[in-house]
Image (spheres, grey):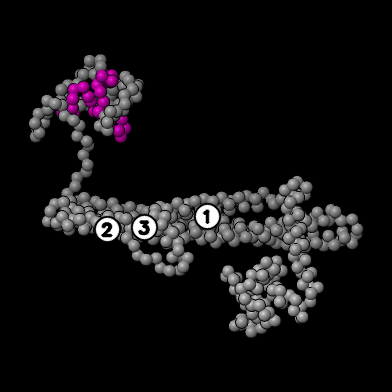
Amino acid sequence: MNAHNPNVISSEIGGNTIKGSTGCQSGDAFSSFLNRPFTALLGRDRCYCPRCLWSPDTTMDSTVKKLASGAGILLSRAVQFTEEKLGHAEKTELDAHFENLMARADMTRHWTEKIMRQTEVLLQPNPGTRMEDFVYEKLEKKVPARQCNVELLGQFMTDAGNEFGSSTPYGKTLIKCGETQKLLGSAEKEFVQASMTSFLTPLRNYVEGDYKAIAKERRLLESKRLDLDACKTRLRKARASETKASAEQELRVAQLEFDRQAEVTRLLLEGLSSTHANHLRSLHEYVDAQVTYYAQCYQYTLDLQKQIGSTPTPLPAWPLHPNAPPSGTIPLAPTPVTADGTNVGPAGRRSARVLYDYDAGDSSELSLLADEVITVYSIPGLDSDWLMGERGNQRGKVPVTYLDLVKS
């Protein structure tokens, strides 16, 4: 029984409330299920379950007329739609601006959904965890606290360091690294939370809220358009004057309803500009969150590097000549000779033209292309058949016989 009106019985099914009069003796889920198609078509001002439809206080003729009218509208739309597809009926076209607005709405939904899904994958790569979070969200329950992968790594490092002994160099360094990993994990959680609040939520609100409202109004507009074109068809086929007058009246009503629905839909579509502005603001906030997160990560790792006494990774040590002097002395490299017999000083930097293509044998060598110009120089301990070559940010050993030094 409805608390506000004791003369109305309410039944719920699938989240929809169907109201009927107190004469309804079937206020259950089944009668509500039967009500759904009729209330959508004919309105919610009465109950359409079988018991109420055929009750003594219901006029059978009026009920049948309402049902027949609703069925006639659906049939008319179906016939009009079919004839349009077959090319046998004309179709009212929307203006170009309206079509552009609808195309823009579809494009916005398409790319917003793609960006949203990929952002979800970025923030939570584990699909199982994403599904678990989705279920908790639908159940309106708080997601349980869990450690991220970086925090787990930090915990393992800390446990391992304690196991090896905090007084040993390796154990002490593991513990320091573990503490830093935990800080990185905490920063990651803050970044994820900020991104979900400021970036993902507005995108999801559009896809699951605003666009669905637009799509609903567009479907309703399409129904009104079919009704309008069906009235135009009936008017063209009308022969008698009375039939023609009735068809003209139906056309005026259909045109009015179509224009009203078109205006409602147009207003929603024109609201996309504000949607884009909101998404732009959210994008700025997402970038700010990224800057904060990566700045924190850089600071934490820099502090860790200082704590464990690390230095920047040096360039790879190239293999020494077999006759190189013992460690601790500075060897003097033999003077390399290029293919044309030109000597290269031990520390001079020269330009050289590559004579032939050369594929690097390993990561310490530099691949070459014929006729390109590179910078070459020698370093202590390097074999006389090789030089160090540079091309932009790339550096590696190159064979002397493949080079022709450019005279300065």
The magenta-colored residue range is 379-408
Q: Nearer the viewer, mark 1 or mark 2?
A: 2
Residue placed furthest toward the right: 240
- Locate residue 117 relative to residue 265 in the image: left or right: left
The verdict on residue 28 being magenta is: no
In this figure, which residue is indicated by the disc labeled 2?
182
Left or right: residue 86 compared with residue 363: right
Mark 3 and 2 residues: CB-CB less than 8 Å, in contact? no
One can see residue 285 in this view: no
Spatial CA span between label 3 and label 2 = 14 Å
- How packed mark 3 is, by other alpha carbons closer than 10 Å (few <14, some 14-19, many 20 or more), is many
Question: Compared to 262, does 318 lie above or below?
Answer: above
- The image position of residue 171, as x and y in percent, is 16, 54
- Judging by the rendered image, the residue that carries numbered circle 1 is 276
Which residue is under mark 3? 191
The part of the image, by quadrant, that contains residue 254 is bottom right
Q: Residue placed at 74% from the left, 65% from the top?
A: 70
